Amino acid sequence: MEHITLLLAIVVVTALVFDFTNGFHDTANAMATTISTGALKPKTAVAMSAVLNLVGAFLSVEVAKTISGGIINENGLRTEVIFAALVGAILWNLLTWLVGLPSSSSHALFGGLIGAAVMSAGWSSINGGTVVTKVLLPAIAAPLVAGLAALLATKLTYRINRKITDEAQLKSTAKGYRAGQIASAGLVSLAHGTNDAQKTMGIITLALVTGGVLAPGSNPPVWVIASAGIAIALGTYLGGWRIIRTMGSGLTDLRPPQGFAAQTSAATVILASSHLGFSLSTTQSCSGAVMGAGLGRKGGVVRWSTATRMFVAWGLTLPAAGLIGAGSEFLTKQGPWGVGVVAVLLVAGSAAIWLLSRRKPVDHTNVNAPDDEPAGVVTTAMAAVSPPPIGSAVPDLKTTIPAPAPTAGTPGDPARPATV
Amino acid sequence: MNIDWAALASVFGVSLVVTIALVGLFTLGIIGLAKQVPTAQGGGPSVLARSGAYACFGLCAAAVAYGIYLIVV
């Protein structure tokens, strides 16, 4: 830690900011079902998840040696490229949070890296095959695996306890389901802390190595581990309430048995996949598990309009973060003033998204509430008359962010006013 | 491009089996405990149901412990 240049300091701070957005973006994975079924109070749930994230960050000894897992050629990667990639990932994370859609933070980071690397060194710096095997295929497999497991598990659990009809006994089983759900949610949080905080440690370490502060191949210093763990835990504690609402009650209505089945399936898929060497995205596994559990209960429905918007967001994650990353890299290539401009744009863009979010704040007080309303005549009429909030927001952001408008702005979609 | 279909298939299989087994076991456990609650139609404490329930929970706890082991190592 002798001579940290200004650029390096900016990259470290940006990496921690990404870690922070990663935390609040992914709180939903562990805690959305726990919150929507009432197993834990919203604040308790995010606090528990935050603590487990922090613990997870310190738990593992195996720190990520590559940040992209071979998707891009990391030899000779310049510090500015990492910075540009982070900018793309952060802005995409914030934008999907604004519209309340769960999307993979890792994919956002990969997208940013790809965009920045292509702009910096051309298409040859990308390993196209790895993009398919590490990003595209898992994106299809994760929700299918987790969804099918949750679907069958939900059917099974409802079948086993179908004879329990007595009021007092039902209360007892509901309590049991909640306890089980908390345990599996805890596992997801712990795994998340280990995986994702490590990713940030990997980025910071790589930046320090490229900047010549650390020797190549060295382990991250303690301050890196601690700051990455704290950043992700703070983000988690802040709670991405918009995404929690979508995942916990927007996709489907979950009851305790379903919440338990969904969370257990998600935890199993995440652990099995990372252990068996075919990594699946946490976010996509959890969303798939929630939908599977929704379909598993007799009379359960999945709100496909919300699900479709989520799928579109998944599809856009890589190209959108890539475009922002490429744009940022184009500026940082121009020299120090370009880096300054990108930093200013990042702050301005984040502030704009935050201000937009204040129009319809979602926090721990209303995270479960309005989504449960069926879309009646009034809601639909209001949606048709008043311009949807995001529709008016997109033009302001058009310069930095490829518009998700075609999917998000459909006025006739009754789920929209409630979820944004 | 080298897609590791075998790994994908084993993730699929293991996830399905483990999820269903755990959810099934846990459900049996909480039903065992629920049967302890006296109802209008009778029912009430039974040693067999209770120990069966605890055995189910024990297996689930072992699975969680293994999960934590996988995360740490």
Image (spheres, coloured by chain):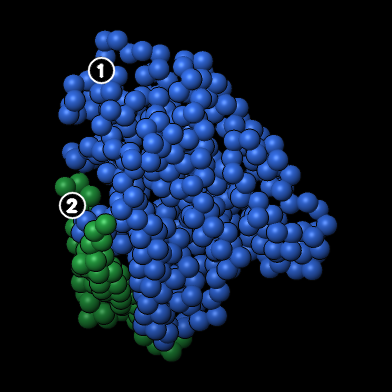
Chain colours: A blue, B green
Left or right of A241? Residue B9 is: left
Residue at 19% in and 25% down: A216
The residue wearing badge 1 is: A212
- Chain letter of disc 2 in the image: B
Q: Residue furthest right?
A: A385
Instruction: Using the rendered view, name the quadrant where residue A15 is placed.
Output: top left
Decide if residue A365 is in sight here: no
**Residue A339 left/right relative to A124:** right
Q: Position of residue B57 (x, y in %)?
A: 25, 68
Figure check: A196 above or below B43: above
In this rendering, is residue B57 above or below A244? below
- The amino acid on which the numbered mark 1 sits, given as a three-letter code, is Gly
Q: Quadrant of the N terminus of chain A?
A: top left
**Residue nearer the viewer, B39 or A183:** A183
Name the subunit of mark 1: A
Q: Which residue occupies 26% across, 38% down? A: A66
- Residue positioned 26% across, 10% down in the render: A2
What label sits on residue A238 in the rendered view?
A: none
Which residue lies most toward the bottom here? B41
| Residue A232, image x, y percentages | 39, 37
Amino acid type at circle 2 is: Tyr
In the picture, the disc for residue B69 is 2
User: Local crowd at mark 2 within 10 Å, few (<14), some, or many (≥20)?
Assistant: few
Classify A134 as above or below A1.
below
The x and y percentages for residue A329 are 46, 29
Q: In x, y percent, where is residue A96?
A: 55, 47
Q: Residue at x 25, y 23 (%)?
A: A209
In the displayed image of the protein, which residue is found farthest to the top? A3
